[in-house]
Image: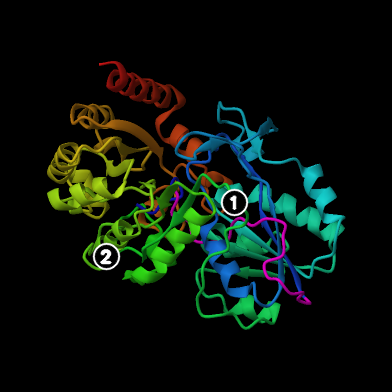
Amino acid sequence: MHSQTRNDLPGWYLLQDLAYSSFMQSMRVLLVNPPIYDFTAYDFWLRPYGMLRVAGRIGHACRLSFFDFLDSRQRDSWGRGSYPYCYVPKPRVLSDIPRRYRRYGKTREEFRQYLKQAPFDAVLIQTVMTYWYPGVREVIGDLRVLQPSAKIILGGVYATLCPDHARSLGADLVVEGFNLDPLWNILSIEPIPEGLPFWPGTGHKYGVLKLTEGCPFRCSYCASSIFKPEFSERPTAECLAEMEQLTRIGARNIAFYDDALLYRPERGLVPFLEGVFRTEIPISFHTPNALNARFITENLAQLMVKAGFASFFIGLESRSDSWHQSTGGKVNTEDFVTAVRHLRTARARSITTYIIVGHPDTDNQSLEQSLAFAHENGTRVLLSEFSPIPGTEDGKKSTAWADLEEPLSHNKTAFAIRRLGADRINRLKDLSRSLNSQMVTG
């Protein structure tokens, strides 16, 4: 599934403060991973894969530095972790939400001190959730004061879904989607066609990877087709080279960012896994973007477990087949039951089911029954709060609860509470915790 509540994300992310190549280049480019303003935030294998790939194409022509507000230090054995945070006042748009608002990441003063150390010719800022733009605005404000001559470029999810709003923050360029020609032009750089992403330093517990681009499905709640209308597989050799690159810098967990990892597996996933077997590199794979249960066959389940898949996240969303038919028909309950059976037979260690909460057509979802259904089939359950995405069918249905012109109204926590009420959201969270506890102790 490609959604703002998961890790689909095209756009720019991470890099460290060090020179990319061994020779001096004339242009100094700073890349910034901004702080997050939200009710909740967690490093659920969140890495700036898009920006790393962009950096791999321009490092030959400029000196790259990086400031990462979201450098999480406390991580579990799979590489996930929490961010430092402080409480901040809620924006007026979110004043009705009975949750405390936070700023996640390094302090603003740390960034200001960093900007005083050296001049930059250009600054690339990655954008993720549309409703995280306050962090982008903060970064631009400090850049204008402390690096007034630097060109500021925004790219990524927010820049693509809300380009007019993004332009109002004062950047010199907003790059929409995957057309990077405006970026090359403003930097006066001739990029290389393709190259390994830039993963700075060593000791990373995990990395991210995509074997495919786009998605063949058109779910009404998903923005995948906006970013990449066509589905395609990346060259297997290129993907294996990225995996080996990650393992060389210490990664032992890799999360797939694909929107349709299992579609046409004979062209993408299977050749990749055959290459993994040849390398004999010990690695654990994870699927936070959700797998389509329809494509989990007995043989594929066995192959994935053998190759080192440690966690399987399945996008059921609801046990109501009529709800699935109305949102695109990606999967049904029979597909789900069969897929889980195959995974359990293959001795998958961790199976988690996503259930969407707060959808505009939630009355047809049977939420409590959906949670119980996933639990009865032997999986953990994870609530995925719905975020209305501009340009999607379900985004259009959401205007009774959200002003789509104001990205803060896209906030998943806020929308789910406005759609269902705080009390019901709390009951659903309590139910999911109770069911998952039974998985551990029962």
Magenta stretch, residue numbers: 7-26
Question: Is residue 234 in sight in this rendering?
Answer: no
Q: Nearer the viewer, residue 282 or 160?
A: 282
SS majority, magenta: loop
Task: Please tell me the numbered disc located at residue 202.
Answer: 1
Q: Is residue 20 magenta?
A: yes
Category of crowding for the residue at label 1, using alpha-carbon neighbours closer than 10 angstroms: few (below 14), some (14–19), many (at least 20): few
Task: Please tell me the numbered disc located at residue 246.
Answer: none
**What SS does tag 2 mark?**
helix
Task: Please tell me the numbered disc located at residue 271.
Answer: 2
Residue in the image at 57% along x and 31% along y: 96
Amino acid bearing label 2: Pro
Amino acid bearing label 1: Thr
Q: Quadrant of residue 249?
A: bottom right
Q: Is residue 313 magenta?
A: no
Q: Nearer the viewer, residue 249 or 316?
A: 249
**What SS does tag 1 mark?**
loop
The percent position of residue 81, horizontal first and vertical second, equals 53, 36
Callout in the foreground (2, 1): 1
Category of crowding for the residue at label 2, using alpha-carbon neighbours closer than 10 angstroms: few (below 14), some (14–19), many (at least 20): some
Judge from the rendering whether residue 105 lies leftward or rightward of residue 218; answer left or right. Answer: right
The percent position of residue 373, horizontal first and vertical second, equals 20, 30
Q: Quadrant of residue 191?
A: bottom right
Compared to residue 103, the image places residue 307 above or below, namely below
Compared to residue 230, the image places residue 181 above or below, namely below
Q: Quadrant of the C terminus?
A: top left
Judge from the rendering whether residue 337 lies leftward or rightward of residue 314; answer left or right. Answer: left
Judge from the rendering whether residue 276 lies leftward or rightward of residue 373; answer left or right. Answer: right
